[in-house]
Image (tube, helix red, strand yellow):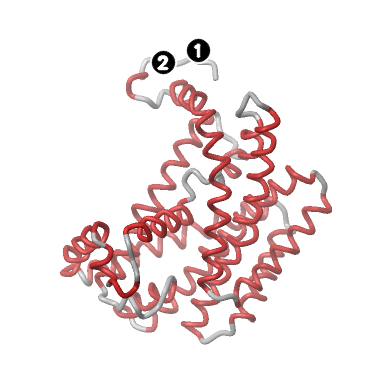
Amino acid sequence: GPAYYIENSLKNKKIAKGLAYFFAMACIGALGLMGNAVQANSISAAFGHAFGASPALVGIVVSVLAGFVFFGGIKRIASVTEKIVPVMAGLYILACFVIIMINYKEVIPAVTSIFYSAFNPQAAFGGAMGISVKQAVRYGVARGLFSNEAGMGSTPHAHAIAKVSHPGEQGIVAVITVFIDTFIVLTGTALVILTSKVSLTSGAGIVLTQGAFAKTLGTFGEVFIAICLLFFAFSTIVGWYFFGEANVRYIFKNKKSVNIYRAIVMIMIVIGSVMKVELVWELADMFNGMMVLPNLVALLALGKYARNAMKEYDILPENENIKEGVTL
Protein backbone atom coordinates (compact mmCIF):
# COMPACT_ATOMS: atom_id res chain seq x y z
CA GLY A 1 0.00 0.00 0.00
CA PRO A 2 0.89 3.72 -0.05
CA ALA A 3 2.90 3.78 3.18
CA TYR A 4 5.48 1.57 1.47
CA TYR A 5 5.68 3.48 -1.82
CA ILE A 6 5.68 6.82 0.02
CA GLU A 7 8.68 5.62 2.03
CA ASN A 8 10.54 4.94 -1.21
CA SER A 9 9.31 7.94 -3.20
CA LEU A 10 11.75 10.67 -2.11
CA LYS A 11 15.54 10.89 -2.10
CA ASN A 12 15.45 12.31 1.43
CA LYS A 13 14.67 9.13 3.36
CA LYS A 14 13.92 10.86 6.66
CA ILE A 15 11.24 13.04 5.09
CA ALA A 16 9.87 10.09 3.12
CA LYS A 17 9.69 7.94 6.25
CA GLY A 18 7.95 10.73 8.15
CA LEU A 19 5.38 11.18 5.38
CA ALA A 20 4.80 7.43 5.28
CA TYR A 21 4.11 7.27 9.02
CA PHE A 22 1.89 10.36 8.79
CA PHE A 23 -0.09 8.73 5.98
CA ALA A 24 -0.41 5.46 7.91
CA MET A 25 -1.77 7.21 11.01
CA ALA A 26 -4.16 9.35 8.92
CA CYS A 27 -5.37 6.28 7.02
CA ILE A 28 -6.13 4.42 10.25
CA GLY A 29 -8.10 7.43 11.49
CA ALA A 30 -9.79 8.29 8.18
CA LEU A 31 -10.90 4.82 7.11
CA GLY A 32 -10.63 2.30 9.92
CA LEU A 33 -12.09 4.60 12.56
CA MET A 34 -14.00 7.69 11.33
CA GLY A 35 -14.78 6.30 7.88
CA ASN A 36 -16.36 3.20 9.34
CA ALA A 37 -18.23 5.35 11.85
CA VAL A 38 -19.79 7.22 8.90
CA GLN A 39 -20.80 3.96 7.23
CA ALA A 40 -22.36 2.67 10.45
CA ASN A 41 -24.15 6.00 10.91
CA SER A 42 -25.67 5.71 7.44
CA ILE A 43 -26.84 2.15 8.10
CA SER A 44 -28.48 3.11 11.40
CA ALA A 45 -30.13 6.16 9.80
CA ALA A 46 -31.52 4.08 6.92
CA PHE A 47 -32.88 1.34 9.16
CA GLY A 48 -34.25 3.87 11.60
CA HIS A 49 -36.11 5.63 8.79
CA ALA A 50 -37.39 2.44 7.16
CA PHE A 51 -38.12 0.23 10.17
CA GLY A 52 -37.90 2.52 13.21
CA ALA A 53 -34.93 0.48 14.48
CA SER A 54 -32.85 1.73 17.39
CA PRO A 55 -29.52 3.21 16.18
CA ALA A 56 -27.65 1.62 19.09
CA LEU A 57 -29.10 -1.82 18.36
CA VAL A 58 -28.27 -1.51 14.67
CA GLY A 59 -24.73 -0.46 15.57
CA ILE A 60 -24.21 -3.43 17.87
CA VAL A 61 -25.48 -5.92 15.29
CA VAL A 62 -23.30 -4.43 12.53
CA SER A 63 -20.30 -4.37 14.89
CA VAL A 64 -20.70 -8.07 15.76
CA LEU A 65 -21.09 -9.07 12.11
CA ALA A 66 -18.06 -6.96 11.16
CA GLY A 67 -15.99 -8.49 13.96
CA PHE A 68 -16.78 -11.95 12.62
CA VAL A 69 -15.32 -10.92 9.26
CA PHE A 70 -12.37 -8.99 10.77
CA PHE A 71 -11.15 -11.96 12.78
CA GLY A 72 -11.62 -14.26 9.79
CA GLY A 73 -8.67 -12.72 7.92
CA ILE A 74 -8.11 -11.51 4.37
CA LYS A 75 -9.66 -14.57 2.68
CA ARG A 76 -12.94 -14.05 4.49
CA ILE A 77 -12.81 -10.32 3.70
CA ALA A 78 -12.32 -11.00 -0.01
CA SER A 79 -15.01 -13.68 -0.01
CA VAL A 80 -17.60 -11.38 1.56
CA THR A 81 -16.94 -8.33 -0.60
CA GLU A 82 -16.66 -10.10 -3.95
CA LYS A 83 -20.10 -11.66 -3.49
CA ILE A 84 -21.96 -8.70 -2.02
CA VAL A 85 -20.85 -5.71 -4.08
CA PRO A 86 -21.55 -6.77 -7.71
CA VAL A 87 -25.06 -8.08 -7.01
CA MET A 88 -26.20 -5.11 -4.93
CA ALA A 89 -24.62 -2.59 -7.28
CA GLY A 90 -26.43 -4.16 -10.21
CA LEU A 91 -29.79 -4.11 -8.42
CA TYR A 92 -29.30 -0.53 -7.29
CA ILE A 93 -28.37 0.72 -10.77
CA LEU A 94 -31.35 -1.15 -12.22
CA ALA A 95 -33.70 0.44 -9.66
CA CYS A 96 -32.32 3.91 -10.46
CA PHE A 97 -32.87 3.30 -14.16
CA VAL A 98 -36.48 2.18 -13.58
CA ILE A 99 -37.30 5.28 -11.51
CA ILE A 100 -35.67 7.62 -14.03
CA MET A 101 -37.67 5.98 -16.83
CA ILE A 102 -40.90 6.36 -14.84
CA ASN A 103 -40.09 10.05 -14.32
CA TYR A 104 -38.60 10.52 -17.80
CA LYS A 105 -40.39 13.84 -18.35
CA GLU A 106 -38.34 15.35 -15.52
CA VAL A 107 -34.91 14.24 -16.80
CA ILE A 108 -34.14 17.31 -18.93
CA PRO A 109 -35.26 19.78 -16.22
CA ALA A 110 -33.17 17.81 -13.70
CA VAL A 111 -30.01 17.96 -15.84
CA THR A 112 -30.61 21.65 -16.47
CA SER A 113 -30.93 22.31 -12.73
CA ILE A 114 -27.65 20.47 -12.08
CA PHE A 115 -25.68 22.77 -14.39
CA TYR A 116 -27.53 25.86 -13.19
CA SER A 117 -26.94 25.02 -9.54
CA ALA A 118 -23.28 24.18 -10.15
CA PHE A 119 -22.55 27.69 -11.40
CA ASN A 120 -25.04 29.54 -9.22
CA PRO A 121 -25.22 27.69 -5.86
CA GLN A 122 -26.80 30.65 -4.03
CA ALA A 123 -29.70 30.66 -6.45
CA ALA A 124 -30.18 26.95 -5.87
CA PHE A 125 -30.09 26.90 -2.08
CA GLY A 126 -30.94 30.45 -1.10
CA GLY A 127 -28.83 33.13 0.54
CA ALA A 128 -30.38 32.37 3.92
CA MET A 129 -28.45 29.10 4.08
CA GLY A 130 -25.18 30.89 3.52
CA ILE A 131 -24.20 28.76 0.55
CA SER A 132 -21.33 30.27 -1.41
CA VAL A 133 -19.15 29.10 -4.25
CA LYS A 134 -16.40 28.38 -1.72
CA GLN A 135 -18.69 26.14 0.32
CA ALA A 136 -20.06 24.43 -2.77
CA VAL A 137 -16.53 23.56 -3.90
CA ARG A 138 -15.51 22.52 -0.38
CA TYR A 139 -18.39 20.07 0.07
CA GLY A 140 -18.30 18.95 -3.55
CA VAL A 141 -14.64 17.96 -3.29
CA ALA A 142 -15.11 16.42 0.16
CA ARG A 143 -18.07 14.27 -0.86
CA GLY A 144 -16.49 13.31 -4.17
CA LEU A 145 -13.34 12.24 -2.37
CA PHE A 146 -15.31 10.27 0.17
CA SER A 147 -17.19 8.54 -2.62
CA ASN A 148 -14.59 7.52 -5.19
CA GLU A 149 -11.41 8.00 -3.10
CA ALA A 150 -9.44 9.04 -6.20
CA GLY A 151 -5.93 10.12 -5.18
CA MET A 152 -6.61 9.49 -1.50
CA GLY A 153 -4.41 6.42 -1.23
CA SER A 154 -7.01 3.96 0.04
CA THR A 155 -7.63 1.55 -2.84
CA PRO A 156 -3.91 0.92 -3.57
CA HIS A 157 -4.00 -1.37 -0.53
CA ALA A 158 -6.36 -3.66 -2.44
CA HIS A 159 -4.61 -3.28 -5.80
CA ALA A 160 -1.27 -4.11 -4.22
CA ILE A 161 -2.34 -7.64 -3.22
CA ALA A 162 -4.15 -8.46 -6.47
CA LYS A 163 -2.56 -11.30 -8.44
CA VAL A 164 -2.13 -9.96 -11.97
CA SER A 165 0.39 -10.37 -14.77
CA HIS A 166 1.21 -6.64 -14.90
CA PRO A 167 0.56 -3.62 -12.64
CA GLY A 168 -1.02 -1.85 -15.61
CA GLU A 169 -4.02 -4.12 -15.26
CA GLN A 170 -4.72 -2.79 -11.79
CA GLY A 171 -4.24 0.75 -13.08
CA ILE A 172 -7.07 0.19 -15.53
CA VAL A 173 -9.26 -1.34 -12.82
CA ALA A 174 -8.63 1.69 -10.58
CA VAL A 175 -9.71 4.11 -13.30
CA ILE A 176 -12.82 2.11 -14.22
CA THR A 177 -14.02 1.90 -10.60
CA VAL A 178 -13.90 5.70 -10.27
CA PHE A 179 -15.94 6.00 -13.47
CA ILE A 180 -18.55 3.47 -12.32
CA ASP A 181 -18.89 5.10 -8.92
CA THR A 182 -18.96 8.74 -9.99
CA PHE A 183 -20.56 8.75 -13.43
CA ILE A 184 -22.98 5.84 -13.07
CA VAL A 185 -23.95 5.26 -9.44
CA LEU A 186 -23.79 8.87 -8.22
CA THR A 187 -25.32 10.38 -11.34
CA GLY A 188 -28.11 7.81 -11.16
CA THR A 189 -28.77 8.71 -7.53
CA ALA A 190 -28.80 12.43 -8.28
CA LEU A 191 -31.25 11.99 -11.16
CA VAL A 192 -33.54 9.84 -9.01
CA ILE A 193 -33.62 12.56 -6.33
CA LEU A 194 -34.23 15.37 -8.81
CA THR A 195 -36.72 13.61 -11.10
CA SER A 196 -38.76 12.37 -8.16
CA LYS A 197 -39.14 16.00 -7.00
CA VAL A 198 -38.60 15.06 -3.37
CA SER A 199 -38.08 18.10 -1.14
CA LEU A 200 -34.35 18.75 -0.72
CA THR A 201 -35.05 19.91 2.84
CA SER A 202 -36.80 16.65 3.80
CA GLY A 203 -33.61 15.09 5.08
CA ALA A 204 -29.91 14.63 4.48
CA GLY A 205 -27.78 11.86 3.05
CA ILE A 206 -29.41 8.46 2.94
CA VAL A 207 -32.74 9.76 4.30
CA LEU A 208 -33.07 12.06 1.28
CA THR A 209 -32.33 9.15 -1.08
CA GLN A 210 -34.89 6.98 0.71
CA GLY A 211 -37.45 9.75 0.33
CA ALA A 212 -36.78 9.96 -3.41
CA PHE A 213 -37.17 6.21 -3.91
CA ALA A 214 -40.31 6.18 -1.75
CA LYS A 215 -41.82 9.00 -3.82
CA THR A 216 -41.90 6.68 -6.84
CA LEU A 217 -41.88 3.17 -5.37
CA GLY A 218 -43.73 3.77 -2.12
CA THR A 219 -42.68 2.07 1.13
CA PHE A 220 -40.80 -0.54 -0.88
CA GLY A 221 -38.38 2.19 -1.97
CA GLU A 222 -37.39 3.00 1.62
CA VAL A 223 -36.90 -0.67 2.50
CA PHE A 224 -34.98 -1.35 -0.71
CA ILE A 225 -32.52 1.49 -0.02
CA ALA A 226 -32.04 0.39 3.58
CA ILE A 227 -31.14 -3.14 2.46
CA CYS A 228 -28.91 -1.89 -0.38
CA LEU A 229 -27.12 0.46 1.96
CA LEU A 230 -26.58 -2.32 4.50
CA PHE A 231 -24.68 -4.35 1.90
CA PHE A 232 -22.86 -1.35 0.38
CA ALA A 233 -21.82 0.15 3.69
CA PHE A 234 -20.99 -3.18 5.29
CA SER A 235 -18.71 -4.17 2.42
CA THR A 236 -17.08 -0.73 2.70
CA ILE A 237 -16.58 -1.23 6.44
CA VAL A 238 -14.87 -4.54 5.73
CA GLY A 239 -12.65 -3.06 3.01
CA TRP A 240 -11.72 0.06 4.97
CA TYR A 241 -10.96 -2.04 8.02
CA PHE A 242 -8.44 -3.97 5.94
CA PHE A 243 -6.87 -0.78 4.58
CA GLY A 244 -6.43 0.44 8.14
CA GLU A 245 -5.03 -2.92 9.24
CA ALA A 246 -2.32 -2.74 6.56
CA ASN A 247 -1.14 0.52 8.10
CA VAL A 248 -1.34 -0.81 11.64
CA ARG A 249 0.99 -3.60 10.55
CA TYR A 250 3.26 -1.04 8.87
CA ILE A 251 3.62 1.02 12.06
CA PHE A 252 3.58 -1.56 14.84
CA LYS A 253 4.61 -4.77 13.09
CA ASN A 254 3.02 -7.17 15.57
CA LYS A 255 -0.13 -9.29 15.88
CA LYS A 256 -1.23 -7.82 19.22
CA SER A 257 -1.65 -4.33 17.76
CA VAL A 258 -3.88 -5.73 15.00
CA ASN A 259 -6.22 -7.34 17.54
CA ILE A 260 -6.42 -4.07 19.49
CA TYR A 261 -7.20 -2.24 16.24
CA ARG A 262 -9.97 -4.71 15.44
CA ALA A 263 -11.60 -4.12 18.82
CA ILE A 264 -11.36 -0.32 18.45
CA VAL A 265 -12.97 -0.46 14.99
CA MET A 266 -15.86 -2.51 16.39
CA ILE A 267 -16.34 0.08 19.14
CA MET A 268 -16.25 2.93 16.60
CA ILE A 269 -18.96 1.22 14.56
CA VAL A 270 -21.27 1.31 17.59
CA ILE A 271 -20.31 4.89 18.49
CA GLY A 272 -20.76 6.04 14.89
CA SER A 273 -24.25 4.56 14.77
CA VAL A 274 -25.50 6.89 17.51
CA MET A 275 -23.49 10.03 16.75
CA LYS A 276 -24.96 13.12 15.08
CA VAL A 277 -24.58 12.97 11.31
CA GLU A 278 -22.92 16.39 10.98
CA LEU A 279 -20.17 15.64 13.51
CA VAL A 280 -19.36 12.27 11.97
CA TRP A 281 -18.98 13.77 8.48
CA GLU A 282 -16.88 16.72 9.65
CA LEU A 283 -14.41 14.41 11.42
CA ALA A 284 -14.26 12.09 8.41
CA ASP A 285 -13.56 15.02 6.06
CA MET A 286 -10.73 16.21 8.31
CA PHE A 287 -8.98 12.83 8.40
CA ASN A 288 -9.49 12.32 4.65
CA GLY A 289 -7.72 15.62 3.97
CA MET A 290 -4.82 14.61 6.21
CA MET A 291 -4.54 11.32 4.34
CA VAL A 292 -4.48 12.91 0.88
CA LEU A 293 -1.53 15.27 1.39
CA PRO A 294 1.37 12.78 1.81
CA ASN A 295 -0.08 10.55 -0.89
CA LEU A 296 -0.17 13.39 -3.43
CA VAL A 297 3.47 14.20 -2.69
CA ALA A 298 4.39 10.59 -3.46
CA LEU A 299 2.24 10.52 -6.61
CA LEU A 300 4.07 13.54 -7.98
CA ALA A 301 7.44 11.96 -7.20
CA LEU A 302 6.49 8.58 -8.67
CA GLY A 303 4.59 9.84 -11.72
CA LYS A 304 7.36 8.93 -14.14
CA TYR A 305 7.28 5.30 -12.99
CA ALA A 306 3.54 5.13 -13.50
CA ARG A 307 3.93 6.53 -17.01
CA ASN A 308 6.64 4.01 -17.82
CA ALA A 309 4.36 1.25 -16.56
CA MET A 310 1.62 2.48 -18.88
CA LYS A 311 4.02 2.53 -21.80
CA GLU A 312 5.13 -0.98 -21.02
CA TYR A 313 1.56 -2.20 -20.82
CA ASP A 314 0.93 -0.53 -24.18
CA ILE A 315 -1.94 1.66 -23.05
CA LEU A 316 -0.95 5.07 -24.37
CA PRO A 317 -2.01 5.44 -28.06
CA GLU A 318 1.28 7.10 -29.05
CA ASN A 319 3.16 4.03 -27.81
CA GLU A 320 1.23 1.31 -29.60
CA ASN A 321 4.38 -0.30 -30.96
CA ILE A 322 6.22 -0.57 -27.64
CA LYS A 323 5.90 -4.19 -26.64
CA GLU A 324 8.86 -4.74 -24.32
CA GLY A 325 12.08 -3.27 -23.04
CA VAL A 326 10.75 -0.38 -20.95
CA THR A 327 12.39 -0.62 -17.55
CA LEU A 328 10.35 0.66 -14.62
Disc 1: CA contacts within 10 A as few (<14), some (14-19) or many (>=20) = few
Three-letter amino acid code at the position of disc 2: Ile
Query: Residue 325 has which mark?
Result: 1
Quarter location, residue 103: bottom left
Q: Do the residues labelled 2 and 1 touch (CB within 8 Å)?
A: yes
What number is the disc on residue 322? 2
Residue 84: which numbered mark, if any? none
Above or below for 108 versus 163: below
Where is residue 271 drawn, in percent x and y?
65, 73
Could you tell me which quadrant the N terminus lies in? top right
Residue 206 percent across, percent down from the top left? 44, 72
Q: What residue type is labelled 1?
A: Gly
Distance from the alpha carbon under mark 2 to that under mark 1: 8 Å
**Residue 142 percent location from the top left of the image:** 45, 56
The kind of secondary structure element at disc 2 is: loop
Q: Which residue is drawn at 64% across and 81% down?
A: 57
